[in-house]
Image (cartoon, grey):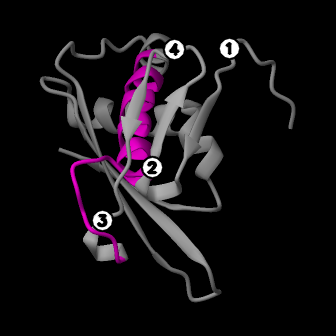
Amino acid sequence: MTVDVKYRTTASATGGRDGSARTEDGSFQVQLSTPKELGGAGGPGANPEQLFAAGYSACFIGALKVAGGQLKLKVPADTTVTATVGIGPRSEGGFGITADLKVSLPGLDRAEAERLVEAAHQICPYSNATRGNVDVGLTLA
């Protein structure tokens, strides 16, 4: 597969899950904390799974808009995607993640909403990156 890259960004992390991360241009900076469930202290910082959930949900809304244009369906302005990301040991060794997307398309007919979500799942870069590697659940709210 080849990708015609239109945008590229760079971020760096130091200190791992209990450190910090920032983009090269300084537009985004975050303190990181390991959740207690993963043996950490918890703390006020974010964790990589939260960042992934935020990115996936925002990206999926973008994919819904592209799909809406292709299908001639108006994506409601108050559309919401809530991503729940899980992490834990894999039976094959190492760790893996799961993702569940709950999509709310207020006022849209259920059949049209289902078509839109399925089309967006084929368009979304996060969905394409995870396909075959991460269990992704899709639910209409």
Judged from the image, the secondary structure of the residue bearing numbered disc 2 is loop
Q: Residues within 10 Å of mark 3 (few under 14, many from 20)?
A: some
Q: Earlier in the sequence, mark 3 or mark 4?
A: 3
Mark 4–mark 2 CB contact (< 8 Å): no
Residue 83 rendering spot, x and y as whole percentages: 32, 46
Which is more foreground, mark 2 or mark 1?
2
> Does residue 136 show up magenta in the picture?
no
Q: CA distance from mark 1 to mark 3?
A: 32 Å
Q: Earlier in the sequence, mark 2 or mark 1?
A: 1
Residue 73 rendering spot, x and y as whole percentages: 35, 15
Q: Earlier in the sequence, mark 1 or mark 3?
A: 1
> Does residue 50 show up magenta in the picture?
yes
Q: What residue would you read off at disc 1?
A: 7
Q: Amino acid at mark 3?
A: Pro
Q: Earlier in the sequence, mark 3 or mark 2?
A: 2
Residue 3 rendering spot, x and y as whole percentages: 81, 26
96 vs 35, left or right, is right
Checking the image for residue 35, the label placed there is 3
Q: What residue would you read off at disc 2?
A: 19
Checking the image for residue 70, the label placed there is 4
